[in-house]
Image (cartoon, helix red, strand yellow):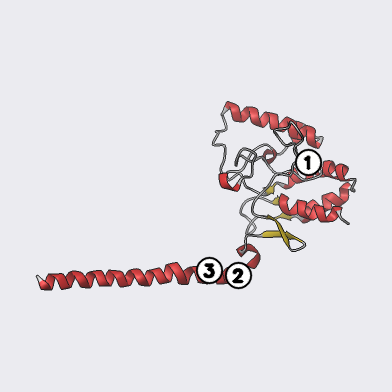
Amino acid sequence: MLGSLAHVVRHHLAALRMLLVFTVITGIAYPLAVTGVAQGLFPYQGNGSVIKDNRRPVASALIGQNFDLPLRKGQTTAAPDPKWFQPRPSAAGSTGYDPTSSGASNLGPNNATLIGTIAQRRATVAAFDGVRPSSVPADAVTASGSGLDPDISPAYAYEQVNRVAKALALDPATVRGLVAAHISGRQLGFLGQESVNVVRLNHDLAALRQR
């Protein structure tokens, strides 16, 4: 009886020691090591890719946002501001780009509601940017899976150049050059597609407007 009890105690103590060892390794040492590497080698990414204006945090390059006109009295839906490059639509939250409601619409490609929404968006974007509906890129009318994607295609960014330049009384060539400078290539040269981070683009556009 005593021998069996001692055997059980030894097994429990061994399990407890393993628990403590792996708690220290995976719960303390590993997180500290990863945090140390991130802060030492990639401080910008490790701290959330925060965009600052005069040392004041204004946005994150990882999370898209709306660039709308202020709501007027009686309005329930904000209108896009023609002075800014617009992001793709977002299904995250009631007004889009809500980090607490990240997700997609979950509507399939044959869903009548989605088809109608895309057609309406295409007409709206075409009228807003002054282009033909057939030339509106797919990302201008469809949301990303997370609803927080800050990137748009170069095609959609270039489509907006003339509208932004006209609204700000800037040379279209200057605005087009700003877009070209913000085009990111495929990851590792072959993953994904070229993209433009619209949050970074608008941040630099604001700096351009202040010159």
Q: Using the numbered discs, state the Cα–Cα distance from disc 1 to disc 3 in whole angstroms.
A: 41 Å
Residue 204 is situated, as x and y percent measured from the top left of the image, at 79, 55
Please tell me how crowded label 2 is: few (under 14), some (14-19), or many (20+) other residues with Cα within 10 Å: some
**Where's the N terminus, which quadrant?**
bottom left
The mark nearer the N terminus, 1 or 2, is 2
Inspect the image, locate mark 3, and give the three-letter code of the amino acid beneath it. Answer: Val
Q: Is residue 84 above or below residue 41?
A: above
Image point (13%, 70%), residue name: 4
Q: Is residue 124 above or below residue 157?
A: above
Identify the element where label 3 is drawn. Answer: helix
Residue 101 marker: none
Decide which of 188, 23 is in the foreground and name it: 23
Residue 34 marker: 3
Residue 39 marker: 2
The mark nearer the N terminus, 3 or 2, is 3
Q: Give the residue number, with chain letter if any, for mark 1.
A: 81
Q: Is residue 72 left or right of residue 165?
A: left
Q: Is residue 25 left or right of residue 152?
A: left
Q: Is residue 188 left or right of residue 172?
A: left
The mark nearer the N terminus, 1 or 3, is 3
Which residue sits furthest left? 1
Residue 102 seen by the camera: no
Residue 195 is situated, as x and y percent measured from the top left of the image, at 69, 50
Please tell me how crowded label 1 is: few (under 14), some (14-19), or many (20+) other residues with Cα within 10 Å: some
Inspect the image, locate mark 2, and give the three-letter code of the amino acid beneath it. Answer: Gln
Question: Would you say the residues marked 1 and 3 are in contact, meaning their CB atoms lie under 8 Å apart?
Answer: no
